[in-house]
Amino acid sequence: MGGPISIVKFHDSIRTSEEATDAAAGRAVGEHAPSGAGITSVAPATSHGSRLSIVTPDPCAAAECRLGGQTLRAECRQLEREEWDAVLAGFQDGSLFQTWAYGAGRWGRRNLSHLILKDGQTVVGAAQIILAKLPGLRVGLAYVKWGPMWHVRGRAPNPQVFRALLRSLRRTYARDRGLLIRVTPWEFEGTAFRSIPDEEGFQRKPLATQRTAVLDLTCSLDELRFSLSRHWRSNLKRAERSGLEVSEGDAEDLLDEFAELYHQMRIRKASEWIPPIHYLPQVQRALSPSMKAQISICRHQGRPIAGLVVSALGERSFAWLAATGEAGQDLRGSYLLQWRAIQRLKSLGVRTYDLGGINEITHPGTTQFKLGLCGKRGRTPTYLGEFEVCEAWRSRLIIGGSDKFRSSLLRIQQFWQERWRAGRNRQA
């Protein structure tokens, strides 16, 4: 665990008079970023094992984090898309869920907050936070989805920066704002920093999908193809001989075709809860060109039969969304789409491909498909998990209660799904 924490209050130089009025009236305080904020580049932090002391801020304030012999500066502000994209582009562990476009398109731009850790004028850590608050009360949730980011491009990750980010998040959102802070890092078990969230007072929560399948794209295409399971390789050959055509890119027509395939799949699988993606067009259009998700559509005789959406930022990628029509199942369109995605990701220099979760009990067919693609060269790690901390009883009571209510609804839904499947099996 890092060194002792010292807390020093700083003058809040970027707080507006309107925010001060809101605070005095007991309303939720918004965040505003001054134009031309000085974000220049991203640089490595200090060496591993340095003794850490952190000074954390009031809401929307600047603060200092002392890491070994260096002083890091933590800033809590709401950034616009161009500023945040520049920050995110400097990290190897950036993800679609940490982009401004996804946060604003899914949750609304007014509900975003950003925490940045700097060494001088260079960024060494960052997180985009989704805020869900009750109006007029210091009650709500601050959620970091697949973050924070601390793997600076071209440098070995420094676990002490991860620790500093967690401390800053806890102080800023849990202690000063009275929110429940929930963090879901895009990391896996078995890493050296696994104990840091526990040491920083975060409580681990189980994820609905705890395991995933990850391909190592540093292998050659021949090695990856040979690694496929026999069943998967056989279906890929069948798809390649079926006269299928694949279109790839980020064009509007591909987006529309995928949305229609996804809609058809939701109707066909009405017994399963498949989340809507009404936000997809808005997110995709708002993403900067280098961060846009790649959409692949497989066609047979000109008709779309399967679709795949893959996001790649830095050296990591993941399968975001997939949809298959009835004809796509018979013609094995999904097999061809995944193989083409692997070829494209390798050409971009991407090193890993996360297939997006596996569960042999709830989704046996999808899990078998992903494990076959993962093959001998892949691995099936467990996600690090979800961590939360709350220092205000109101937020813990309300957010915790809503979580229990949602879990009860899911259990009821699963019960009726199992009854429905059992009835269909008896009829068959």
Image: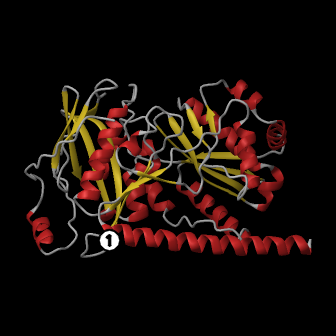
**Which quadrant of the structure image shows residue 73?**
top left
**Quadrant location of the N terminus in the rendered image:** top left
- Horizontally, residue 217 falls left or right of residue 287, namely right
The correct choice, above or below, for 79 with respect to 384 in the image is: below
Which sits in the foreground, 254 or 319? 319
Label 1 neighbour load within 10 Å: few <14, some 14-19, many 20+? some
User: Which residue is drawn at the image coordinates 73% and 31% (left, top)?
Assistant: 376
Residue 286 visible (yes or no): no
**Which quadrant of the structure image shows residue 401?**
bottom left
- Horizontally, residue 424 falls left or right of residue 251, namely right
Label 1 sits on a secondary structure element that is helix
User: Which residue is drawn at the image coordinates 22% and 64% (left, top)?
Assistant: 30
**Which quadrant of the structure image shows residue 148?**
top left
Task: Tell me which amino acid carries mark 1.
Answer: Arg
Name the residue tied to disc 1.
394
The correct choice, above or below, for 189 with respect to 202 in the image is: above
Residue 175 visible (yes or no): yes
User: Which residue is drawn at the image coordinates 37% and 42% (left, top)?
Assistant: 199
Q: Position of residue 113 (x, y in %)?
A: 29, 56
